[in-house]
Image (cartoon, rainbow, N blue to C red):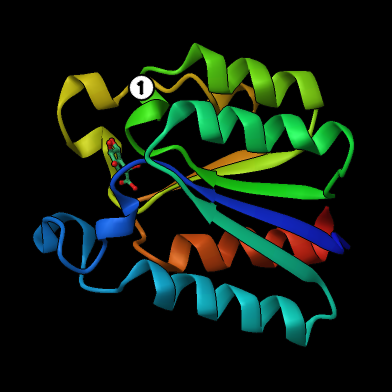
């Protein structure tokens, strides 16, 4: 069971609840993080969350895992999914097992969202299930990782 879990949220996810609710729903990021915190705490695991609109900050946070490792990473890279070789390389460097989560079904959307720089490195990818996707990723981490 993963005892130390990090959840990373990429750009614009701080706007959840207000951002395109037809696509991303009305649940806020705080509500998602609170729910994950309580699920992790109930399982005796520690869970840290971070959201950033900055690629550099996300790369820096992943690099910290060299010195302060976690057992499992849950990441929604948001728009960086489709653009960021740098964030992919950072995750590959620290070799942390991870699940990629997307609230929306990226394959039912524009063609540029169909490619991810992360999926081939991931344990798995969950998309289209809204905030439930994060909970399922956490359940997996707690049970299997
Ligand atoms: C997203 C999908 C991405 O294509 C988009 O850029 C996001 C959010 C999702 O959770 O559905 O910002 O990762």
* Side of 39 where 117 appears, left or right: left
Above or below: residue 137 compared with residue 102: below
Question: Which image quadrant shows ligand 1?
Answer: top left
Q: Position of residue 94 (x, y in %)?
A: 80, 26
Residue at 55% in and 68% down: 135
* Side of 32 where 49 appears, left or right: right
Nearer to me, 133 or 55: 55
Q: Position of residue 111 (x, y in %)?
A: 19, 21
Q: Which residue is mark 1?
A: 82
**Element at label 1:** helix
Q: Position of residue 69 (x, y in %)?
A: 86, 43
Q: Position of residue 80 (x, y in %)?
A: 39, 27
- Is the residue at mark 1 in contact range of ligand 1, meaning its CB lies under 8 Å from it? yes
* Side of 108 where 47 appears, left or right: right
Residue at 34% in and 41% down: 11
Nearer to me, 139 or 72: 72
């Amino acid at each position: 069971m993963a005892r130390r879990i990090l959840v990373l949220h990429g750009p614009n996810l701080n706007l959840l609840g207000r951002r395109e609710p037809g696509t991303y729903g009305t649940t806020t990021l705080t509500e998602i993080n609170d729910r994950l915190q309580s699920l992790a705490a109930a399982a005796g695991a520690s869970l840290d969350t971070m959201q950033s609109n900055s690629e550099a900050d996300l790369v820096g946070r992943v690099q910290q895992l060299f010195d302060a490792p976690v057992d499992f990473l849950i990441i929604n890279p948001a728009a960086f999914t489709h653009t960021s070789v740098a964030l992919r390389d950072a995750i590959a460097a620290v070799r942390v097992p991870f699940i990629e989560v997307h609230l929306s079904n990226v394959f039912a959307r524009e063609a540029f969202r169909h490619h991810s720089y992360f999926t081939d490195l991931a344990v798995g990818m969950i998309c289209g299930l809204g905030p439930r996707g994060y909970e399922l990723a956490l359940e997996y981490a707690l049970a299997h990782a």
